[in-house]
Every structure is written in C-alpha cells, then in structure tokens.
Amino acid sequence: MDTDILEIEGLRFVKAVSAEQLDMITSRLADRINQDYAGREVVFLVVLNGAFMFASDLLKKIEGVHTVCFIKVSTYSGMQSSGEYKEVIGLTQELKDRDVVIIEDIVDSGFTMKEMLERLKEQDARSVEVCTLAFKPDNFKGDYEVKYKGLNMGAEFIVGYGLDFEQKGRNLKEIYKKI
C-alpha cells in the first residue's frame, strides 16, 4: 500500500514518516548503539508486538553477535492506556551482569517502561537502556532516561511499522498519524 491517507476501523490516518525516513532512523540508532557497546555482548529485549518491525530493521544493523529475546506486555486497550501492566510473555533470559537494551515501539506516558524497568532491576543486569522508535515528550511522565530515541512525536495516535490500532496496521511500511 502506497498512499498518504488510509482508513482503519472508521478512523482516518495520514502518512507521517516514510519508509526512507525510518531506514535513516534505524541506521542512526544502530550507529549509536554500535559505538556505545563496541566489543561488548548485548541482550536485546524486544517488546512485542509493536516493536517487531523496528527491532528487525535495527538489529540487522547492529555489529557483532548478540542475544535477542522477546517479552510481551499489555497496557493498551484501543487508543488508550489501561493503566494496568500485564506480562503476557515473560522474560526467559538470564540478565545478571549483562548489558541490556530494551527495544520498544513507542514510549508515551512512560508507564509501561517504568513497570518493565522496575521488574528488570530485580535481574541485576550490569546496565539497562531503552531504545524506542517513537517518543512522546509532551506525554512522558517517567523519571528515567530514554537514551535512544528514534523520533519525537506529538500527542497524536500513530499506526504502521509495527504499531497498531485494534491489531490492524502493523504491516504498513510507513507510520501514519490519526487525523
């Protein structure tokens, strides 16, 4: 699909970020991660479902041999955060004394990541950093740093490139915002 406007479940969305821009974003983030972790093995913790496309493209640009594992959490219902953190697929990798980079699709209010970081502290990782495709600084209420930010977004709801509305739109190669 190559269009500037699309409709999902009766809502209209306009293209906000092209596939080419997404490629540049993943390259820039990979370059920073490669520099920061040169010569070190990293555990990349990919948050499903939304981060799968971003993580796939990003990890192809990461140098060296690393561990990749997945976790699935749920905090959203439709376009709103439920305010309730639920681990659907839990962590299976040992993180003690390891460097961890969490790959997330979007950090909005920061609630989900705050809960995840608190749970990861119990694992005694050497370091834990957050890498997100999209960051919403106006909505962010967290008291932690998001070290690797792909792009800053406003408050608008976005879909595509792994992000969904009612489980639809994840397959789109661009990002669209609600109009």
Image (cartoon, rainbow, N blue to C red):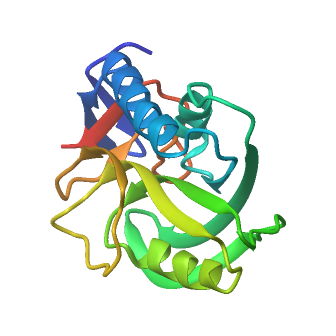
| Residue 25 on image: x %, y % | 35, 30
Give the residue furthest to the front.
39
Q: Is residue 167 left or right of residue 173?
A: right
Horizontal side of 58 relative to 13 (left or right) equals: right
- Number of numbered discs visible in the structure rendering: 0
Instruction: Please give the name of the residue rendered at 58% of the width and 39% of the height, measured from the top-left corner.
Output: 55
- Residue at the top extreme, as displayed: 2
- Image quadrant where residue 79 sits: bottom left
Write the residue at 56% across / 39% down: 38
Residue 168 in the image, given as x and y percentages of width and height: 53, 43
Percent coordinates x, y for residue 13 in the rendering: 27, 37
* Viewer-nearest residue: 113 or 83: 113
* Residue 174 visible, this orientation: no
130 and 33: which is toward the camera:
33
Q: For residue 30, say whether it is visible.
A: yes
Q: In which quarter of the image is the N terminus?
A: top left
Q: Along the line of sight, which residue is nearer the eye, 169 or 18?
A: 18
At x 46%, y 59%, the residue is 130
Quarter of the figure with the C terminus: top left
x, y percentage for residue 63? 62, 28
